[in-house]
Amino acid sequence: MKPVWIITKRELRAFFDSLIAYIMITVFLGLSGFFTWLYGSDIFLLGQATLQPFFSVAYWTLFFFIPALTMKMLAEEKRSGTLELLLTKPVSDWQVLLGKFSASLLLIVIALALTIPYYITVSSIGPVDQGAVWCGYLGMILMSMSYIGIGLFASSITNNQIVAFLTALFIGMFFLIIFNVLANNFTGNLAQLFHFLSISTHYDSISRGVVDTKDIIYFVSIAFIGLTLAESVLSKRNIVEN
Amino acid sequence: MSIKVENLTKKYGTQRAIDNISFEVKEGEILGFLGPNGAGKTTTMKIITCFMAPSDGDVNVDGYSIHEHPDLIKKKIGYLPESNPLYHDMPVLEYLEFVAELQGVQKDQIKKRIVEMVRVCGLNIEKHKKIGELSKGYRQRVGLAQAMIHDPDILILDEPTTGLDPNQIVEIRKLIRELGREKTVILSTHILSEVEATCDRILIINKGKIVADGTPDSLRNKAQGQEILRVQILDASSKDEIISSLQSIETIGMVDPVQNNENTFVVNSKPEHSSRKDIFNLCVSKNWVLNEMSPIETKLEDIFRELTTD
């Protein structure tokens, strides 16, 4: 496990050295703060002490931010050749992927942790549904895991960061919107399938304060499938043709 | 620590990048890998360093197979890839620390090793800069430093002197020679004088096959076969007289007058004969002045060209 941590440390440091981390955290806090306190259906309009406006904004901002974090992770290493150097050190493909995965997740957790003041402020205004808040955060982290898995897969299939970014958005779009739309347009088993595949189904139930293992398995398996696909793309160099 | 390559083949589609090659590198040997572009040098190195699996065959490093113990082998090898890829946004020292940790250098040893590498590779002035800010020569030194940070028994260097200025080239070659005393080194290059200056043994590879294997001297002898002399004779009455006299000597096979140069000839002796003495005696008896008689050495370049062109 040690190599995973070494890679995680390097990736995190790279986020902070290149300003990506600061920009992403500032914009994330700014956007979610703006919509939570000042504009649209903010908490003053709702007249309730709730973090629901924050979660519904973060739901969208993470969808755009995470592909921006993961897009360079493999694509850039492949383009510049540093991946070769990395994989000729005593580390496996999986350790590299897990290191990058956990670095991205840690950055998201840091960004989310910085929104705790929102929670403190809101709870000083009125009684807050504690369960809904903490489950909301848990839902954010689980959803981020899925997006990171998708993002790393998108980054593994190309040498171009922009292509990786757009591919991740494209795949994410299915889970975020398209499956939901399809679920409403079909009936029967097909509708149920699309309903199950849609992120909103699972996210909504968690953010209401209901933590079901089914939902956790859903998010974790998307992340796992993303990583597995990325691993198989990386290991293509080892394929023996006959 | 020895490397044993057995019947290695790598196919890309229908093309064979390397085709059933076998060779062995002994401990403490510096092996020069020579060949035109696309001959399969880099592919072979990528397989030895466990980056890529071969289509067929095996590599044994210190008795461990690349198929079964890649992690053990990776620890023993220091590798400098062809284009010297580095993280440009990392400072030099931070990067070396990262590589040392990945290579599993003991925590209390890491600082010592970094200091040692900075000294050996002459990185002291630039050590706090980001790698992206360094000149190509310094980046190459960082590449070498990261390859050697864990004091590996085997160094695999893919074109280690590209992009360096002549002074740096001399330094790096000296460094490789020093390292080669206790380590096994494989280096690839296009530069033939580099192989002569640094390597104990040369392996010439062309189209995925080994076409020559031996020390620089033994390769030269093999290619040479016969003695070739450049002779300049003065005071003779005519050019033709010299040619006919030379050709009458038993040990001489062929005489060619050198163009644009009066009285100079290229003399090919017959195989396994030397004609120097006879030429001298001829000049004495005819009262000619022997102004020049020098052997023409077959250059490594000629051997290389002969072996790698169709």
Image (cartoon, rainbow, N blue to C red):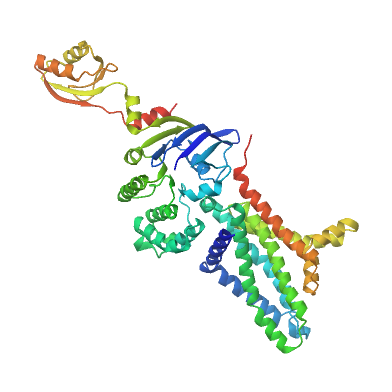
Identify the residue at horizontal 91%, vertical 57% (top origin): A188
Which residue occupies 67% across, 76% down? A32
* Residue A26: image location, x then y, percent: 59, 75
**Residue at (55, 37) in percent of width and height:** B58
Q: Is residue B202 above or below residue A39?
A: above
Residue B111 versus residue B161 in the image, above or below: below
Residue B97 is situated, as x and y percent measured from the top left of the image, at 46, 61
Going by the image, does B43 lie left or right of A184?
Answer: left
User: From this viewpoint, which residue is outermost toward the front?
Assistant: B63
Residue A66 seen in the figure: yes
Q: Is residue A124 left or right of residue A24?
A: right
Give the percent coordinates (x, y) of residue B72: 53, 48
Quarter assignment of residue A225:
bottom right
Q: How many marks?
A: 0
From this viewpoint, which residue is outermost toward the left? B287
What percent of the width, then of the height, locates residue B117? 38, 57
Above or below for B29 versus B114: above
Q: Is residue B130 above or below residue B260?
A: below
**Left or right placement of residue A85 versus residue A176 in this view:** left
Q: Furthest residue to the right?
A: A188
- Which quadrant of the rendered structure holds the C terminus of chain B? top left
Judging depth in this view, the residue of B81 and B59 nearest the camera is B59
Task: Tell me the quarter of the picture where residue A43 sits.
Answer: bottom right
Q: Residue A163: in sight, yes or no?
A: no
Pick the front one: B20 or A39: B20
Q: Quadrant of the N terminus of chain B?
A: top left
